[in-house]
Image (cartoon, rainbow, N blue to C red):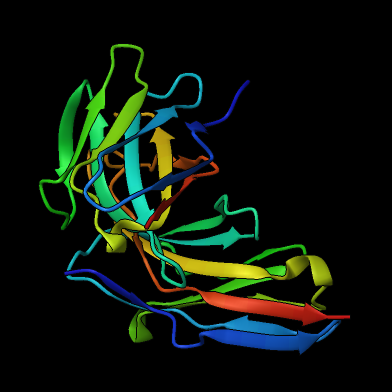
Amino acid sequence: DAGVTQSPTHLIKTRGQQVTLRCSPKSGHDTVSWYQQALGQGPQFIFQYYEEEERQRGNFPDRFSGHQFPNYSSELNVNALLLGDSALYLCASSLDGSGWSSYNEQFFGPGTRLTVL
Amino acid sequence: AQKVTQAQTEISVVEKEDVTLDCVYETRDTTYYLFWYKQPPSGELVFLIRRNSFDEQNEISGRYSWNFQKSTSSFNFTITASQVVDSAVYFCALSEAKSSGSEKLVFGKGTKLTVNP
């Protein structure tokens, strides 16, 4: 049973370029969340996708967008890259609909290290 | 707004020492979850524990123990008889409890633990 996978592992881009990061959720999971982790900081929530729609969004500009496909995999797109976008981008998957009485664990992938020069 | 504070940026101990990682949180929610994650140099977040806000019982798992005190909004993590393999960055996180069951995680900035032989 494969866990959460992300591609690519590392990426180097220059300012102003656009980038697409990919995530395949753990088998059986239908919800994908993306987090940005700058060096020396904790992960920050970007957004969450469920049923191919953005369900929640953190405090990130519109340059950050995403997509979820029918097979539940997801992409994170960042336009007009800034130096400050350099970070580890983590994808987490979970199963929706547990209800109030329980919590469905978020399983994290290994991340994509993005460097913007 | 939710907030997690990990005041200790870095801790260095000698193997076999006990070490406690502090976590203080803020939330207006009456129902929430608290977490600890470990992030080794490889970057992948490893889940350690989840605590429901209704359950203030302390928990012990092997050399790990957690002390949840709602009165002081703290959720501290103790490693007994530390080992070199415990060296990592540890994150405390907070999540609302909602019907979706997989709400966004709000992370602290992390505590880097170094266990020296």
Does residue A109 appear anywhere in the picture?
yes
Evaluate whether residue B57 shows in this view.
no
Q: Is residue A78 left or right of residue B57?
A: left
**Which of B108 and A102 lies nearest the eye of the viewer?**
B108
As drawn, is B51 to the left or to the right of B94? right
Quadrant location, the N terminus of chain A: top right
Q: Position of residue A85 (x, y in %)?
A: 30, 57
| Residue A58 drawn at (x, y percent) | 18, 53
Q: How many marks?
A: 0
Residue under the image location 45 percent in, 79 percent down: B23
In this view, B24 is above or below A76: below
Extreme residue in the top direction: A70
- In screen coordinates, is B19 left or right of B97? right
Question: Is A24 in front, or is B93?
Answer: A24
Residue at point 30%, 62% (across, down): A83
Examine the image and state in which quarter residue B11 appears. bottom right
> Residue at position x 42%, y 74% from top?
B109
Question: Up-down: is B74 above or below B59?
Answer: below
Instruction: Give the vertical position of B39 relative to A103 (above or below).
Output: below
Q: Position of residue A114 (x, y in %)?
A: 42, 50
Residue at 71% from the left image edge and 79% from the top image edge: B114
